[in-house]
Amino acid sequence: MTESRHVSTHIDRSAAEVYAYASDPRNLPAWAPGLLKSVEQVDGQWVADSDMGRILLDWAPDNPYGVLDHHVTVPSGQTFYNPMRVTADGDGSEVVFSVRRQPEMTDAEFDRDCAAVQADLDALRDILQG
């Protein structure tokens, strides 16, 4: 069983607007700079440059439910599943990312991962709220 921590932010934009922006991998370098520096589509697959080297991104297909789940495959070949959702919250929306603790990860490393995801979600909020 994997431990998860749900990290979230409220954004004063509709869920549809947040989903439209966040579901486009080309926007990732702007709001998730800790994960990657650039991203491009190569032969139908999203490839990104990160501090770890070239990584592969596999996003959930467009959907009306706000599902932004994605897999990240790092240079070692290991793939990480990342559950993520955009839901309506009043006139705005909430973005929730489930950070999953990896085997052998210390408490400090898990806390650092969660803080990095929170920073990315806060950057997404700041971009979309102007």
Image: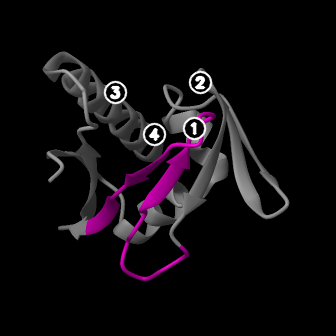
Q: Give the residue type at disc 3.
A: Ala
**Which residue is located at x 43 percent, y 83 percent?**
64
Asked whether disc 4 touches disc 3, contact meaning CB atoms under 8 Å apart, the reply is: no
Whole-angstrom CA distance, mark 4 to mark 3, is 21 Å
Whole-angstrom CA distance, mark 1 to mark 3, is 17 Å
Asked whether disc 1 touches disc 2, contact meaning CB atoms under 8 Å apart, the reply is: yes
Q: Nearer the viewer, mark 1 or mark 3?
A: 1
| Rendering quarter of residue 112 | top left
Whole-angstrom CA distance, mark 1 to mark 2, is 7 Å
Task: Look at the numbered disc 1 and give the secondary structure of its residue.
Answer: loop
- Image quarter of the C terminus: top left
Task: Look at the numbered disc 3 and give the secondary structure of its residue.
Answer: helix
Asked whether disc 2 touches disc 4, contact meaning CB atoms under 8 Å apart, the reply is: no
Any mark on residue 130, and which? 4
Residue 62 covered by magenta stretch: yes
Q: Give the residue type at disc 1.
A: Val
Whole-angstrom CA distance, mark 3 to mark 2, is 15 Å
| Rendering quarter of residue 90 | bottom left
Work out whether residue 21 or residue 67 is closer to the camera in this orientation and state it.
67
Any mark on residue 52, and which? 2
Upstream in sequence: badge 4 or badge 1: 1
Upstream in sequence: badge 3 or badge 2: 2
Tell me residue 68's x, y (percent).
Answer: 43, 63
Upstream in sequence: badge 2 or badge 4: 2
Any mark on residue 74, and which? 1
Identify residue for label 3: 116
Upstream in sequence: badge 1 or badge 3: 1
